Amino acid sequence: MRSVTHVHPFVIPVDLTRPMEAAIKTAKVEQKELDALDDRIQQQDITLDLVASIDPKFWKFSGAFVGALTTFYAVKSKTRSWFEDRK
């Protein structure tokens, strides 16, 4: 897949992000190690990644995108707590 194919300019809800992150982590553990991509393929911006989808009719999300969303929600939560502590 191309590295930007399943990265979108929006955020999905946290209640969907957590199960998707868990599913991707489990799939990575269960997946056998694949052969590295050769240089010809790497030059075309193609990477090996897992793609998560809730339903085939919905958007598909790359593992990196789901990981970034998980980090986003963690930072958002910590920032909110920090603001509450400052009051």
Image (cartoon, helix red, strand yellow):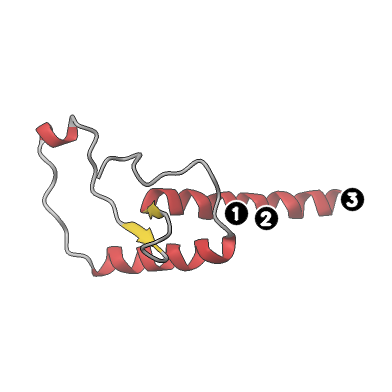
Residue in view at x 24 percent, y 45 percent: 1
Q: Which percent across, then down, holds residue 57?
A: 40, 61
Query: Helix, strand or loop at disc 1?
Result: helix
| Residue found farthest to the front | 57
- Please identify the quarter of the rendering in which residue 58 is found: bottom left
Ranked by sequence position, the earlier of labels 3 and 2 is: 2
**Depicted 46 relative to depicted 67: above or below:** above
Q: Are marks 3 and 1 in contact (CB under 8 Å)?
A: no
The amino acid type, in three-letter code, at marker 3 is Lys
Residue in view at x 85 percent, y 48 percent: 86
Query: Helix, strand or loop at disc 3?
Result: loop
The amino acid type, in three-letter code, at marker 2 is Ser
**In-front residue for pair 3/5:** 5
Q: Which percent across, then down, holds residue 48?
A: 23, 48
Left or right: where does residue 4 sit relative to residue 43? Answer: right
The amino acid type, in three-letter code, at marker 1 is Tyr
**Depicted 3 relative to depicted 43: above or below:** below
Q: Which residue is mark 2?
A: 77
Q: Which residue is mark 1?
A: 73
Q: Are marks 2 and 1 in contact (CB under 8 Å)?
A: yes
Q: Are marks 3 and 2 in contact (CB under 8 Å)?
A: no
Residue in view at x 67 percent, y 55 percent: 77
Within 10 angstroms of label 2, few (less than 14), some, or many (20 or more) residues?
few
Left or right: where does residue 85 sit relative to residue 48? Answer: right
Q: Which residue is mark 3?
A: 87
Within 10 angstroms of label 3, few (less than 14), some, or many (20 or more) residues?
few
Q: CA distance from mark 3 to mark 1?
A: 22 Å
Q: CA distance from mark 3 to mark 2?
A: 16 Å
- Please identify the quarter of the rendering in which residue 24 is found: bottom left
Ranked by sequence position, the earlier of labels 3 and 1 is: 1
